Amino acid sequence: LVAIIMAGVLGIYGLIVAIIISGGVSSPMNGGNTYSQFTGWAHLSAGLCCGLCCLAAGFATGVAGEYGIIATGLRAELNHAKNTRNTMGMGGGGNSAEVVDEGDAGKLYIGSVTILSFSGAIGLYGFIVSLIITSSDVWACGDAK
């Protein structure tokens, strides 16, 4: 669930950058162009920066989320097998297939959530750099002297 939420946040980063870039695009006025090449390249680089960083963050989130969930499930299953083996040796009827106590699998889950948050930080850094690029000075056509 955490990985799905973080993937949605990465999409929202791209949406915010797209809205900011579309607000910076201006139409020609009085027969002259007001949208310079500098502004166009800055908008392109901001979009690529956010998009590629969010792509990398999404890939890292997917890989870390998958392996984190698999490892947590295997740890819980191993702990359940150890507990079942111990109760069978004591004469208990350990034939229950239900996992009651997952042992230290919760610690592994906390670690995987920490890794997920660091992988999401890649997209956040790209988002911040995109905001810096789009908030730079706009160079309008005809400003060259």
Image: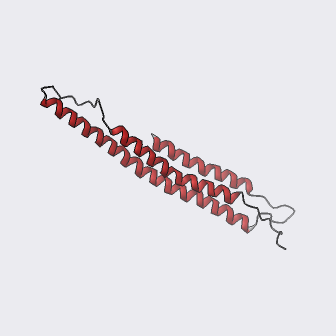
Residue 106: x %, y % from top left: 36, 38
Residue most extreme to the top: 92
Residue most extreme to the right: 30
Q: Quadrant of residue 127?
A: bottom right
In this rendering, the answer to whether 79 lies above or below 31 is above
Relative horizontal placement of residue 24, taking residue 99 as reference (left or right) = right
Which quadrant is the C terminus positioned in? bottom right
Relative horizontal placement of residue 20, taking residue 68 as reference (left or right) = right
The foreground one among 73 and 44 is 73
In this rendering, the answer to whether 87 lies above or below 105 is above
In this rendering, the answer to whether 107 lies above or below 29 is above
Give the residue displayed 70% in from the left and 64% down from the top: 40
The foreground one among 36 and 13 is 13
Q: Total of numbered circles in the picture?
A: 0
Give the residue displayed 33% in from the left and 39% down from the top: 105
Residue 16: x %, y % from top left: 64, 49
